[in-house]
Amino acid sequence: MSGKVSTILQRKGSTVETVARDITLERVTQRLAALGIGAVVVVDDAGRPVGLCSERDVVRALADGGLSALSTTVGQLGSGPLAVCRPDTDAEQVMATMTEQRVRHVPVVDDGGALVGIVSIGDLVKWRIDELDADRAHLTAYVSGATY
């Protein structure tokens, strides 16, 4: 099974919610809740991804710092190196990266490092299920002698 990240982005769209490094966790939580999403990409002044702030990051910050953590900026979180991929990356490779690095979201960048989308574990699971459904339909048609 092979599919590219670009195919997933074509299906889901390339809209990405971004925030600057100086936004507070309180504002991030409001944005995540209002939009019903699990993460935002932190970008530098040029709009290039430099980090990610997810619900998991917010929970950890609150656990470590209590309610005062809400005044912390996302730039102060320092969540480590950012896993990114390109549109021509195999979806299975992104799944492996997510598993190895224990992340649920991977920003997609072009050759110049500009942000062009984001894929989540949910996007990849949906892609995988769609691929398995298509394979099943092909095999069923083959076994039954029908043309597909």
Image (cartoon, grey):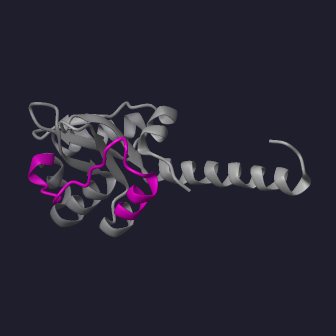
Looking at the picture, how far across and down is residue 35, in whole percent? 40, 34
Query: Left or right of 70: which side holds 3?
Result: right
Q: Residue furthest bottom?
A: 100
Depth check, front residue: 134 or 99: 134
Place residue 65 in its image quadrant: bottom left
Q: Which residue is located at x 22 percent, y 38 percent?
A: 111
Residue 75 among magenta residues: yes
- Near-viewer residue (53 or 92): 92
Residue 82, compared with residue 30, is above or below; it is below
Give the percent coordinates (x, y) of residue 6: 42, 38
> What residue sits 23% from the left and 59% below the top?
62
Q: Which of the two residues, 82 or 139, is positioned nearer the viewer here?
A: 139
69 drawn magenta: no
| Count of numbered marks | 0
Above or below for 88 versus 139: above
Find residue 129 and report its horizontal and vertical position in percent.
62, 53
Question: Is 1 left, or right, of 116 in this rendering?
Answer: right
Q: Which image quarter holds the C terminus?
A: top right
**Residue in view at x 12 percent, y 49 percent:** 72
Q: Position of residue 11 (x, y in %)?
A: 52, 34
Q: Is the N terminus in the top left, top right, bottom left or bottom right quadrant?
A: bottom right
Q: Nearer the viewer, residue 102 or 40?
A: 102
**Could you tell whether 135 is left or right of 127 in the image?**
right
Q: Which residues are magenta?
A: 74-97
